[in-house]
Image (cartoon, rainbow, N blue to C red):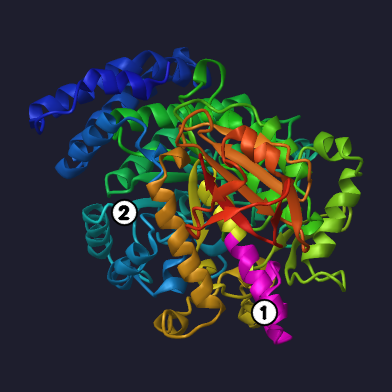
Amino acid sequence: MNQAAIHKTLAGKPGRKPTPGKLKDLFEMRRAANFTLIQDLFFSLYPEARYAASFQNLQKLLSSQYKNRPAALKLQDIERQGEGNWYQSGAWTGMQLYVDRFCGDLKKLKEKLPYFEALGINFLHLMPITKRPSGPNDGGYAVNSYTEIDPTYGTEEDFIELTKAMREKGICLMLDFVVNHTSDEFPWALEAKSGNLKYQEFYYTFPDRNMPDLFEAHLPEVFPETSPGNFTYSTEMERWVMTVFNTYQWDLNYTNPVVFLSMLENLLELSNKGVDVIRFDALAFLWKKIGTVSQNLPEAHQLVSLFRLCLQVVAPGVIILAEAIVAPEEIVAYFGKGILKGNECEIAYNATFMACLWNSVATKKTNLLRRSLRGLPPKPDASTWINYIRCHDDIGLGFDDSHISALGWDPQTHRRFLLDYFCQRLDWSPAKGAVFMYNPFTGDGRITGSTASLLGLEQAIEEKDVLKITSSVNKILMMYGIILAAPGIPLIYAGDELGMLNDYSYMAEADKVMDSRWINRPLHDWETVSGLGTVENHASRIYFGLQHLIALRKELPALADARSVTYHDAGNDHLLVFERDGETENGVLILANFDENPQVVRTSLLSALGYMDKGQFQNLIDGKKQKVRSGLLELSPAELLWLPKC
C-alpha cells in the first residue's frame, strides 16, 4: 500500500491547528508506519550483521531533523496530508528557470513573483543555486554544497525570505538534489584528494586500471565529445575515480552506508529550508555494478525508495521528482513497482511524451506519439507526470525501437532524420537547432535549441515572413496547449512564454563553447516583457495565448491528473485527438493538427463521443460555437481545439 495514504489515515480528518505535542505524535506514528519498510530496504542494501549500528544512526538522524523542521513547515505538512495527493491538482502550472539568467539573484526573483502570478504560474523549478566551482560546473550540477546558497545568488536569508513569500502566494518551489555525484571541490572530495581513506571510500576510487577497465567494458558514455570514458586519474590521490558525467563530477559510492546517511542528512536539511519538491538528478545512475550498464539497477530503485520513505517520516508534505530520462518502460518504474509500488517517486518527467511531440513536429504525424503513450505501463494512482516541451537540457530520442519498427521505419535511420530535421541539415526544414553530444561511432546524438527556434520562428523572423511567423506562433501555442491539457503538471521553460530565440553568445565563452545546451539558456528579455500588451508582436501573441490557456486549464476539473485520458484514432495520422474525463459530463476533447496543411476529422467521431450535437460544437479556447455543414471538421495547420461535452 502507498505509505502516504497510511499517513493520511493516521493524521485523521483536517480540523483545528494541531499542537506541538500532536505534531510530534504524528511524526512517531509515521516513523512506526514506515519502520519495517525502511529497515528491510536498509538491510537489503547494507547487511544487518555488519551495519546494525548504521541503522541506529539513521533513526537518530530522523529524530534530529524532525526537531529542526520549522513549525510553519510542520503545519503545512499536515495540511497537505489532509488534501491527499495535492500535486495532482489541475491548478498547478510550472516554470523552470536559471535565477541568474532570469533576473540576477534571489532578491530580484522575490520581486518578480507578480510576473509569475500574472501569467498563472504557481510552481517554480529553480536551477541549482547552491555553491559550485567557479570554473566548469555543468550549469551548477557539479555541487560544492547541497544546502549553502552560492553568493552569486544571494544569502541564506534571501533564500528563506523567498520561500516564505512563495508560501504566502501559494507558489510551490522545486530545487535540485544532485544525488549521483559531487564536484571534485566538494569537502569530501578534497579530503579524499588529501589522502583521507574514509573519504576515498565515499567515491569509486582505485589504485590502478584493473577495476575501472572491468566497469568500462559495459558502461556507455554520457558525454562522449567532452568527457569520453567513465574514469579520471586524480594526480592528488594517485588513484582513478569514477566520473560518469564530467571529469570534475565524482560519482558517489552508495555501497557505503555512510554515504547514504550523509546524503539523507543533506536531503532533509534542504527540505527544512522550505523546498516543496526535490528533483533527484540522474537517479538512474545511483548504483554501480560490474558487468552491467549501471543504470536503472534494482538497487538504485531500493535506494530511491529508502530516501523517500525517510523523507516522508520527517517532512510528509515534501515530494520527490525522478529525473530519469530513460527508455519509456523504465520511466514508470521510478514510481515504484512490486513491493515498492507507489513508494518511490511521486513525480517523474514524461520524457517519452516530450520526445514524441517533437517527432510529430518533424514527421507531421502522430502515429508514434499515440503508440508510445498507449504503450507506457500504467502509473500508480498516487503519482503524476511533469509534462514539458523544452528544458535546460537536450532532447533525447529515447523512443522504443519496437514502436518505430512497427510503423515500417528503421530506428537508427529515423533518429538520424530527426537530427537532420532539427539541426539545420535539411534545406527545407524551418528548424534552427544544434546537435548535442554527437557520437560518430554510433551515430547517436541529441538535439538542443529553444522552442521557438526549433519551431521555425527564428528563421521566419530572419526572412521577415509574416505568414511563417504566424505559423510558428501557432505551433508554439499548439504544443503548450497539448501539455496543458494532458495528465500531470505542465512545465514552461522560461523564455518560451515570449518566444525567445536561440542565444549564440555561449560560443564566445571558453567554459561553455563545448556545451551547445547553452544555446537555450538566454538572459530573460525584460525589454520585451515591458512591451507586452502595448506592442502587437509574436511575443505578445504567445504570452497572452499561454496566459489564457493556463487560466482555462484551472477552470476545467477534467484536466486534473486523477481524471482519465483516452487517445483516439481519428482516421487521420496528422491529428492528435485525446479525451480527458470522457466518462463524465465534464469531459474535454483535445484536437491538434501537426500538419502544414488543413486536415479533417469525421464529425461522426465527435458526435459519438458527445462533443458535437447536430453538427454544432464549441471551442473552449475562443468560446465560439461553430456549425459544421458536412461530415468533416477541418482544422487549420497547427490549430488546437478544446471541446466540452454537449
Which mark lies nearer to you, 2 or 1? 2
| Residue under pointer 1 | 507
Image coords of residue 397 (percent x, y): 74, 49
Answer above or below: position of 246 versus 346: below
Q: Nearer the viewer, residue 190 or 545?
A: 545
Q: Quadrant of the N terminus?
A: top left
Principal SS element in the magenta part? helix
Magenta stretch encompasses residue 465:
yes
Q: Nearer the viewer, residue 514 or 168?
A: 168
Asked if residue 482 shows in the view, the reply is: yes
Image coords of residue 187 (percent x, y): 43, 53
Between discs 2 and 1, the one toward the N terminus = 2
Magenta stretch encompasses residue 99:
no
Amino acid at pointer 2: Ile
Asked if residue 206 shows in the view, the reply is: no
**The residue tagged with tag 2: helix, strand or loop?**
loop
Answer above or below: position of 613 versus 498: above
| Residue under pointer 2 | 171
Mark 2 Cα-neighbour bin, 10 Å: few <14, some 14–19, many ≥20: many
Q: What residue range appears in magenta?
A: 453-477
Image coords of residue 454 (percent x, y): 69, 67
Amino acid at pointer 1: Met
Image coords of residue 160 (percent x, y): 24, 58
Is 87 left or right of 447, judged from the image as shown? left
Q: Quadrant of residue 77?
A: top left
Q: Quadrant of residue 144?
A: bottom left
Q: Nearer the viewer, residue 195 or 187?
A: 187
